[in-house]
């Protein structure tokens, strides 16, 4: 998996590793003892701690701000209470009553109450730009420890999004923020185990929140974040002992670990690498990839055994053509033919699809239809070494079926803007993390018509492919209105049929999720035998669980 996927790209030089200067930014304090301080490698540092923003700095969700509950994607377990102590639905599935945890304070000393919960969800309801998922609830605090969310219709599938994927913000701060969408929230006031210490564009620190509600936590007193320049910089910093926690695809990771006894890593694959296609001509997409035959030919033209070996470093694995995770999600896949993608290329099927669609090979071996050459540009982020390798390998593989692939490397900001606004043909990305492991949260975000937009407009809700299909929309609506898994499974089967036929997202493989640790300064990191949270340093919410679990060494 490419370095710091999901949150931000890494662009600053490794020379900044030791930098720690900066002005105090609300909640600083004395410098922590080195024995209770760790360093985390992250992406470009831009002062944004807005918990509603998709570009907030990575510790915002989990270390500074907290949700009502935490869902563990690493293993099957009941949701863990965080700022809530309980919840219940009414019989109609239209009212969700939440009991809040007593004794919690904001890091400025003000008490946390159910009024903050109600304020947060009402702010979302009245601010469409904060609500890309379409959360349709208004809220009322009926007591200091009770908030009631009211939905317009039966909304049981909103539960994980409400409980576990929304940071709660303090009313006494955010009621005076004029534009909650763009405000960078430079002095964050949260309930999390840490608060902001020093800050500069070269590094910033979090310091222990002494009033944190969970007794005895955190044990670590300071967390320093530094920018790293892709995987090579991350590897160098790790070996040099300048960083304690990174999540990066490091080629030859086993050899790197052998170089220092204090280094270790875990691999927790939960996401599928896909080629996102701007698929819908009616929404303004242009290029050969708007033809379903081209998308399916790419799917069949891939030699994934070679891709896993060359790009995945042997730690990637077979994906499912449903976008779900083989093994964990098998019970949600009804068609046995859709359990796993064939590992070898099927050139015969790919060529047949293109021939029947009128794409004829030219003298140079590249196909064309009319005046349109079957040439496609695929973007990825500079520094994502595994994805760059995928593109280079795919270029050779797809040439064999008459498709010209032109890889492009851009900054993370450019990559993200292109996907969000539809200004691309193909784009490498990962899918699979949602509010819970229920397939609804993969399919709704990526496939629902309501979650996309015309090219040139933001599809920040996640349907970057601009995909739209009435059968899929109907199935999603039915699945959203029930908690009966048999009914949901039948609806997902319909979605999977359409998806396999249309391929707006072309699965490549289940990518690795490598996370590396230095154990000389902190103990209690997740291990292969104890994955108590998804350990990726960029993973919202889980990063807070890890930071408040580890303990200083010495």
Image: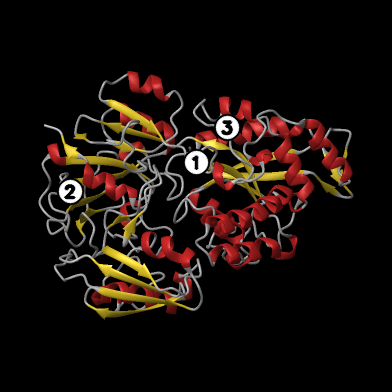
Q: Residues within 10 Å of mark 3 (few under 14, many from 20)?
A: some
Name above or below for residue 54 compared with residue 182: above
Question: Which residue is painted at 34% across and 76% down in the image?
Answer: 148
Distance of mark 3 from mark 2, alpha carbons? 39 Å
Instruction: Give the SS element for disc 2.
Output: loop
Q: Relative to residue 181, is residue 140 drawn left or right?
A: left
Circle 3 or circle 2, nearest the eye: 2
Please state the horizontal and vertical placement of residue 123, each as a whole percent of the image.
Answer: 38, 76
Asked if residue 55 can be seen in this view, the reply is: yes
* Location of residue 162 by image quarter: bottom left
Answer whether labels 1 and 2 touch (C-beta < 8 Å): no
Camera-side residue of 365 and 258: 258
Camera-side residue of 352 and 384: 352
Q: Relative to residue 258, is residue 393 drawn left or right?
A: right
Circle 1 or circle 3, nearest the eye: 1
Residue position for label 1:
328
Distance of mark 1 from mark 3, alpha carbons? 27 Å
Question: Which residue is painted at 31% across and 62% down in the image?
Answer: 68
Give the mark, 1 or 2, whose residue is nearer the N terminus: 2
Please state the horizontal and vertical placement of residue 293, each as a whole percent of the image.
Answer: 79, 47
Residue position for label 3:
389
Q: Residues within 10 Å of mark 1 (few under 14, many from 20)?
A: few
Q: Relative to residue 170, is residue 289 drawn left or right?
A: right
Please state the horizontal and vertical placement of residue 98, each as a whole percent of the image.
Answer: 31, 70
Instruction: Give the SS element for disc 3.
Output: helix
Give the mark, 3 or 2, whose residue is nearer the N terminus: 2
Quarter of the image with the C terminus is top left
Name above or below for residue 116 compared with residue 275: below
Residue position for label 2:
218
* Location of residue 463 by image quarter: bottom right
């Amino acid at each position: 998996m490419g370095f710091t996927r999901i949150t931000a790209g890494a662009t600053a030089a490794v020379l900044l590793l030791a930098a720690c200067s900066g002005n105090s930014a609300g909640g600083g304090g004395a410098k922590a003892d080195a024995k209770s301080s760790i360093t985390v490698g992250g992406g470009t540092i831009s002062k944004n701690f807005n918990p509603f923003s998709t570009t907030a700095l990575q510790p915002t969700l989990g270390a500074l701000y907290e949700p009502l509950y935490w869902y563990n994607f690493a293993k099957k377990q009941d949701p863990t209470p965080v700022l809530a102590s309980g919840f219940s639905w009414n019989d109609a599935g239209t009212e969700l009553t939440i009991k809040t945890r007593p004794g919690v304070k904001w890091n400025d000393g003000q008490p946390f109450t159910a009024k903050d919960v109600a304020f947060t969800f009402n702010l979302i309801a009245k601010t469409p730009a904060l609500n890309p998922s379409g959360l349709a609830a208004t809220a009322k605090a009926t007591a200091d420890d009770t908030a009631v969310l009211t939905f317009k219709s039966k909304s049981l599938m909103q539960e994980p999004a409400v409980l576990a994927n929304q940071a709660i913000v303090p009313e006494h701060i955010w009621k005076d923020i004029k534009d909650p969408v763009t405000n960078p929230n430079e002095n964050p006031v949260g309930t999390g185990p840490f608060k902001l210490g020093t800050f500069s564009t070269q590094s910033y620190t979090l310091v222990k929140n002494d009033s944190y509600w969970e007794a005895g936590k955190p044990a670590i007193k300071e967390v320093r974040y530094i920018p790293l320049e892709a995987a090579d910089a991350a590897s160098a910093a790790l070996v040099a002992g300048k960083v304690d926690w990174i999540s990066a695809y490091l080629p030859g990771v086993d050899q790197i670990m052998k170089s220092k006894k204090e280094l270790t890593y875990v691999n927790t694959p939960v996401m599928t690498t896909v080629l996102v296609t701007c698929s819908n001509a009616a929404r303004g997409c242009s290029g050969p990839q708007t033809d379903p035959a081209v998308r399916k030919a790419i799917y069949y033209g891939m030699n994934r055994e070679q891709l896993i070996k060359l790009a995945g470093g042997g730690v990637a694995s077979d994906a499912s053509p449903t976008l779900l995770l083989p093994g964990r999600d098998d019970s949600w896949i009804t068609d046995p033919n859709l359990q796993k993608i064939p590992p070898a290329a099927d050139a015969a099927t790919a060529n047949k699809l293109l021939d029947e669609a009128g794409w004829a090979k030219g003298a140079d071996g590249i196909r064309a239809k009319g005046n349109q050459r079957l040439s496609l540009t695929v973007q990825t982020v500079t520094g994502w070494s595994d994805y760059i390798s995928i593109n280079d390998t795919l270029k050779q593989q797809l040439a064999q079926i008459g498709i010209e692939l032109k890889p492009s490397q851009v900054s993370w900001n450019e990559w993200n803007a292109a996907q969000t606004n539809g200004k691309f043909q193909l784009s490498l990305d990962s899918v699979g993390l949602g509010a819970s492991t229920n397939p609804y949260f993969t399919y709704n975000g990526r496939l629902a018509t309501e979650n996309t937009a015309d090219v040139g407009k933001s599809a920040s809700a996640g349907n970057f492919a601009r995909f739209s299909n009435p059968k899929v929309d109907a199935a999603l609506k039915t699945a959203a209105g029930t908690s009966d898994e048999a009914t949901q499974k039948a609806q997902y089967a319909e979605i999977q049929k359409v998806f396999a036929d249309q391929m707006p997202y072309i699965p490549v493989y289940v990518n690795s999720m490598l996370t590396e640790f230095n154990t000389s300064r902190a103990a209690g990191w997740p291990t292969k035998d104890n994955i108590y949270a998804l350990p990726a340093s960029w993973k919202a919410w889980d990063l807070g669980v890890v930071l408040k679990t580890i303990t200083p060494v010495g």
